[in-house]
């Protein structure tokens, strides 16, 4: 499989008091949905802000679509190509939906008003109260603000989306809708569109995630296609009598009086020979938790 | 197509196996295009990489061929040869069962009974 990359970074670095984001190499494959996973404070938003151009004071080079770098990114025609949604409220609170629509139309050539309106309906931005563009942004809940931002960004002609925690403020039904929308976006792009999103709701987003990047303490500690990660890490369960021996082999483990459960690296699986164990394919959530646990213990 | 999340069989393998069955049963014919990787992912609500890997598996088995920019199409199937291959698989698995039975001191009659019991359970 030959891969192209939508965003590539080299030696990205940003120092804060007591925290350093340092990423020697960074790649997001083109044509896929990539999830950024990590603890609070791991540096996910900082990285996304650097890539989106919200934070301009980081070191390193970033290339987009293998065509231009972060300086050229600031040109108006390049700004059309990548859409961003994040937790900051970048609409003024007294704006109405109508005004959000007008401002977006002025800012982006590729913004389609009709598409925005149908997306607002689809995402139920107006709730059950009917279609009302006079509604003020300040009257919206966090979830509805997120829906409005998603409708806005999806109404544009873009080739990539950077979504910082899009699922967090959404209810379960809307999370499913978000997944559908991300899949449609990628399908319509036929290999030319990519989505990069951060999330704590790994389970909700797992089915659509192609590539996962796991961060810890400002560094990338694991990354890869989910299908490959699911072969690298194996969920094993075994009997209590073997737990001491298993602990030496397993990547992460929890045990009680009745047995143990943990993640084993596929390459170490033969070291468990002779034990009565069951093997399962872990979920991305289980892999993420194991990787985060293993790395946060090492780091502290 | 049915996808089981916790069957222990990777999802890409489940897809590949079901498509393989369709091809061998003649439901998909020589020259037919498989659904596009991204549309199948969307339909099944699974990731793009999963369907991609499923198609790669089918390609590796020689069942389909990737056409640049056009997707995957079904190859001509030599049904005689495929039957032969499957028969080999069946024989290998049965040999293994016979060996295991010997180790455990299970009699021939018992072994036959077990096979019959399993077959009736399938039905």
Image (cartoon, coloured by chain):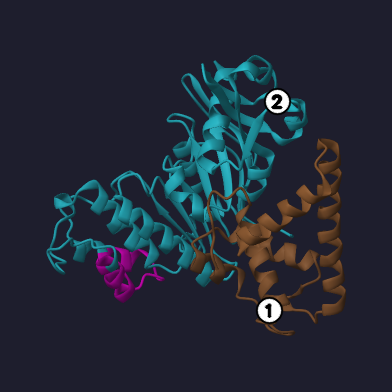
Q: Residue at 30% of width from left, 76% of height from top?
A: A114
Q: Nearer the viewer, mark 1 or mark 2?
A: 2
Instruction: Tell whether A15 sits left or right of A268.
Output: left
Q: What colour denotes chain A?
A: cyan
Q: Quadrant of the N terminus of chain B?
A: bottom right
Q: Write down the quadrant of residue B38 in the picture.
A: bottom right
Q: Is residue B101 above or below residue A183?
A: above
- Magenta-span inclusion, residue A160: no
Residue A99 image offset from top left, x and y in percent: 21, 63
Q: Residue at 74% of width from left, 30% of height from top?
A: A268
Instruction: Tell whether A204 sits left or right of A115.
Output: right
- Provide the secondary structure element on which disc 1 rests: loop
Q: How many numbered badges does the structure rendering display?
A: 2
Residue A148 image offset from top left, x and y in percent: 28, 58
Residue annotated with mark 2: A275
Query: Which chain did the image draw in brown?
Result: B
Q: Is residue A69 above or below residue B90?
A: above
Q: Are marks 1 and 2 on the same chain?
A: no
Residue B20 image offset from top left, x and y in percent: 70, 70
Residue annotated with mark 1: B70
Q: Nearer the viewer, residue A146 or A271?
A: A271
- Magenta-span inclusion, residue A115: yes
Q: Quadrant of the C terminus of chain B?
A: bottom right
Q: Chain of mark 2?
A: A
Residue A212 can be seen, yes or no: yes
| Cα distance between the residues tagged 1 and 2 | 49 Å
Q: Residue at 56% of width from left, 30% of height from top?
A: A290
């Amino acid at each position: 499989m030959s891969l192209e990359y939508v965003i590539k970074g080299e030696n990205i670095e940003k120092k804060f008091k007591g925290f350093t984001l340092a990423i020697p190499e960074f790649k997001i494959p083109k044509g896929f949905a990539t999830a950024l996973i990590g603890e609070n404070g791991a540096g996910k938003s900082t990285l996304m802000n650097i890539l989106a151009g919200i934070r301009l004071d980081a070191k390193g080079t970033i290339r987009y679509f293998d065509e231009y770098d972060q300086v050229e990114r600031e040109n108006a025609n390049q700004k059309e190509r990548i859409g961003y949604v994040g937790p900051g409220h970048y609409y003024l609170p007294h704006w109405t939906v109508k005004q959000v629509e007008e401002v977006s139309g002025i800012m982006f050539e590729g913004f389609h008003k009709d598409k925005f309106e149908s997306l607002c309906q689809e995402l139920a931005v107006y709730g059950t109260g009917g279609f009302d563009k006079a509604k003020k942004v300040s009257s919206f809940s966090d979830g509805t603000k997120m829906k409005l931002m998603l409708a806005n960004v999806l109404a544009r002609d873009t080739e990539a989306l950077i979504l910082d925690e899009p699922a967090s403020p959404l209810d379960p039904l809307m999370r499913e809708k978000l997944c559908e929308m991300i899949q449609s976006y990628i399908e319509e792009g036929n290999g030319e569109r990519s989505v990069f999103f951060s999330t704590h709701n790994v389970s909700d987003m797992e089915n659509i995630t192609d590539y996962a990047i796991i961060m810890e303490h400002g560094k990338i500690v694991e990354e890869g296609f989910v299908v490959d990660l699911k072969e690298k890490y194996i969920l094993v369960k075994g009997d209590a009598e073997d737990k001491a021996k298993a602990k030496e082999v397993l990547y992460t483990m929890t045990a009680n009086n009745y047995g143990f459960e943990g993640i084993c690296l596929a390459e170490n699986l033969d070291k468990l020979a002779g034990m009565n164990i069951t093997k399962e394919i872990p979920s991305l959530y289980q892999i993420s938790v194991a990787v985060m646990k293993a790395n946060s213990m090492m780091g502290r | 197509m049915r996808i089981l999340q916790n069957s222990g069989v990777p999802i890409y393998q489940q897809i590949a196996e079901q498509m393989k069955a369709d091809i061998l049963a003649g439901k998909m014919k020589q020259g037919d295009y498989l659904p596009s990787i991204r549309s199948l992912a969307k339909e099944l609500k699974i990731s793009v990489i999963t369907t991609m890997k499923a198609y790669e598996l089918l390609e590796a088995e020689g069942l389909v061929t990737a056409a640049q920019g056009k997707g995957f199409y079904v190859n001509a199937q030599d049904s005689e040869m495929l039957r032969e291959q499957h028969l080999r698989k069946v024989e290998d698995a049965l040999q293994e069962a016979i060996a295991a039975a010997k180790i455990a001191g299970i009699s021939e009659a018992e072994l036959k009974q077990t096979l019959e019991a399993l077959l009736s359970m399938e039905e």
